Amino acid sequence: MASKQKMTGLIWTSGQPVPDPAELTLAPEELPDVRPWEMAEMVFRGCFQELSGQREIEIAKITVIGEGLFRTAHEATIELPGTPWNGTYAALIPKPGASAALNARCLKEVSLLTRLAAMPLPFSVPKVVAVYQAWGYCILVRERLFGAHGGATWTAEKPWSVAVHIAAATHQIPVERISDVVPGFETRGKHGDQLLAQNDSPRSELAPSLAWLRQNRPSDTPPVLVHGNLVPSNVVLDYFNRSTPPGVLDWDFSVYGDPALDLATICAAADPPLTADREVDRVLKAYRAAGGGAVSVTEVRFHQICIHLRRYHEALAKAPGRAGDELRHLQTLLKPARR
C-alpha cells in the first residue's frame, strides 16, 4: 500500500506521463486560514517558480472565473517575459471540505484533456500545463480559454443549443480512444442503477420518484463518453469572434455511461427548466440533428429526476429551506401531463 505523502510542489508537467492515482496517495490537510485569492497566489507563484526556474515572478490581479462543486477557478496573468510561461492561466483551488477523491478525479481529467486536445473536435479544451500539489490536494493549472466564462442558466447569448452540439460530439468519441483513462459502466442501465442506489431513501415523500425510476430503468445498451456536468459555466464562448469553437471546461466528472445524463443536465440549466415532453423533445431533435444517437424523453426524465433527488438530499443537509423547491420540481416531473 502506498504511503501518504505530505509535500508541496509540482507532481506533473505537460509532456510527462500522468501519475497513477493509486500510486500517489495524498492526505488532504486543513486549508490555510487565508482568503481564497491568497491560496491561488501561493499556487501560481510556487508552480511557475518551478516551471521557469526563476524566483522573481510578477502576478497580475487574481480573479475568480468559475465556481464548481469542490473547486474554485482563479485566473491570473503571469509576467515572465522571454519564457514560454508568459501568459494568462487558471488554477483550480479546492474548497474547504473537498475529499481526497478530488485528487483521482484531477489526474483523470488531466489524462482525458490530453487525449481530447489531440482529437479533431468541434470544440476546444484547455491545455493543462501542470499539476501542483499543496495542502494534500492535486491542483490543476491550465491555460485560460479566451471568451465569456460563468453563467448559471442558458441565455440568448449562450443558448442551450450550443451545449447540445457539444454533447452530440462528445458522445460520438470512440470508446477505444479514451476508455483506459475514463471510468465507466458496462451499460447505460448499470449507470442508472448506480444513480438510483445513490439517491435511494426511506423518506416517504420520495417514494413516488424512486418507484418511477425503478419502473423506467435505462436499457442495457452500450455506454458513451459523458461529460457529466454540462452546465453553462463550463461552456466558454467568444462573443467577439463567433467563428471560434466553444470551449468546454471541467471534465473531472466524465464517465462512460448514459448520454441522457448530459441532456438532462442541459434541460435542468434552462430558465425555466425544460421539463414538458414537448420541450425535452425539442432538445432531442436538436441533438439528433447534431449527430447524436437515439435517446428518448423517458431516458432524459430518468436523469432529470435523479438530478433533483440529489439536490433534495443536498438541501436537507445544507439548506433545508430549499428542500421544498426541489420536492416541487420532482412532483412536476412526475405529473401525468408531462408524459
Image (tube, rainbow, N blue to C red):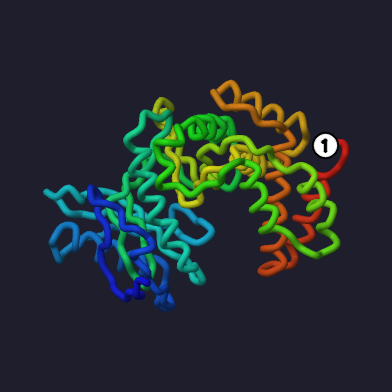
What SS does tag 1 mark?
helix
Residue at which label 1 appears: 338
Residue at 77% over, 56% down: 325
Residue at 80% over, 51% down: 209
Residue neighbourhood size for the residue with mark 1, other residues' Cα within 10 Å, grouped as few (<14), some (14–19), many (≥20): few
Q: Can residue 330 be seen in this view?
A: yes
Q: Name the outermost residue toward the top.
A: 289
Q: Is residue 231 visible?
A: no
Give amino acid for label 1: Arg
Residue at 31% over, 57% down: 19
x and y percent of residue 285 in the render?
65, 24
x and y percent of residue 115 in the render?
35, 40
x and y percent of residue 84 in the render?
17, 47
x and y percent of residue 45 in the render?
25, 64
Q: Which of 157 and 211 is in front in this view?
A: 211
214 sits left or right of 53 in the view: right
Looking at the rendering, which quadrant does residue 246 occupy?
top left
